[in-house]
Amino acid sequence: LISYFLMSSTLDQIRRPPISLIKLIECVGTLLNIPKSVEKSAYRAPLPSNYDSTIEKLKSDFYGILNKLSSLQSSDIKNDIASDFYNKTLEPGFDYEDAINAGGLLVRELFNVVFLILLRLQCDGNRLPIKQFNKLVLVDGTRSSYVAFDTACHIHNHGTLNILAFTVTDEDAEAHDVSGHAAHLLRDLTRRCKQHYKFQDHCFKVIGVSCNMQNLENQPQILEQQLIESDSSVFVMGISEYNIGEAGTGALALWATWQFAGDIILCKGMSPIRPFSQVRSSRTFLVYLDSKDNHQLIFLKAIKFMRPGDSILMMTIVES
């Protein structure tokens, strides 16, 4: 009894926990569906956080909660909770050794349960995937490229969203015009990621790349290099009548179709995007299945890009 009391009271006695311990406890709080609070933390946890509430919950019945968590199956965890839980494990500072050094054996037991649940989620092929998918989206300033950017932000969940701010330079153009456009594109994309889509700094990366008008044939090589360096398995770009021409980036879509081994998403400029006034905007996916297609593979491909609130419609045409 004394041993149990000492162990269960250890966590609340750590008045200034390291960030690694905060991330672990917040993971547990997410699984317990404990909401985040913006009130000042007694443990100086960065706000908003559920750290204080989760500590109080663990203090009341640590091993009862531990048993409850260890019995959780993938089907018991909703998609939005699973997504928040996994994202928390990917945040900078989530570290096994550092947290155990601060909290001892008690923290090790929590970590073991967290990793067990994570393994169950990742091994379940019948739910939204709990895996990292780095994505790369090309933005050149056209409306269709901003639609592609909005689409990439919507499907982005785990991993890094790499935003390629692509500009084509002309020797006849004024130098300040070229540099001004490139600088504006970088600032605008960064602002949208932080203020509109509320991405944390580690979730996205804006990359500035330019190509000279005289060397447009090098565009595929530039794109291929960025896809390799960013380790992206999904490529998103916009298609419109304005980027199909000689100076446009439309040729990259044709190159990616035949040369890129990952998934490709092409976006039209007339497609709707999420308004600034909305926190999220649900999407409907229409999946056409041919009789010769691998239906399960196509279905899994589709749900990989779905987010909470989205819906999917499966369609096939059969002979009557």
Image (spheres, helix red, strand yellow):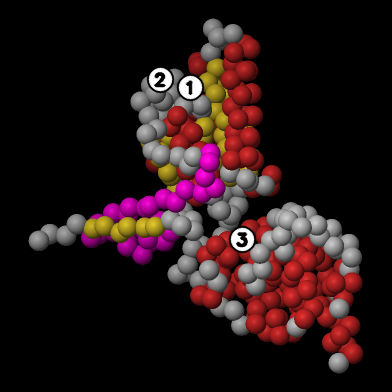
**Callout 2 touching callout 3 (CB < 8 Å):** no
68 lies above or below 226? below
Direction from residue 318 to residue 163 in the image, left or right: right
Q: CA distance from mark 3 to mark 1?
A: 42 Å
Which quadrant would the N terminus be assigned to in this image? bottom right
Q: Magenta stretch?
A: 276-304
- Nearer-N-terminus badge (2/1): 1
Inspect this view and state whether residue 229 appears: no
- Nearer-N-terminus badge (2/3): 3
Q: Residues within 10 Å of mark 1 (few under 14, many from 20)?
A: some
**Callout 3 touching callout 1 (CB < 8 Å):** no
Circle 1 residue: 216
Q: Specify the amino acid type for callout 2.
A: Glu
At horizontal 49% and vertical 33% (from top left) the residue drawn is: 146
Q: CA distance from mark 2 to mark 1?
A: 8 Å
Q: Which mark is residue 84?
A: 3
169 lies above or below 223? above
Q: Residues within 10 Å of mark 3 (few under 14, many from 20)?
A: some
Q: Specify the amino acid type for callout 1.
A: Leu
Is 302 a magenta residue?
yes
Is 38 a magenta residue?
no
215 lies above or below 82? above
Q: Residue furthest front?
A: 39
User: Residue 240: where, in percent of width, then height?
Assistant: 37, 29
Q: Which mark is residue 178?
A: none
User: Residue 223: where, in percent of width, then height?
Assistant: 52, 34
Circle 2 residue: 246
User: Residue 37: where, in percent of width, then height?
Assistant: 71, 60
Q: CA distance from mark 2 to mark 3?
A: 44 Å
At horizontal 48% and vertical 22% (from top left) the residue drawn is: 216
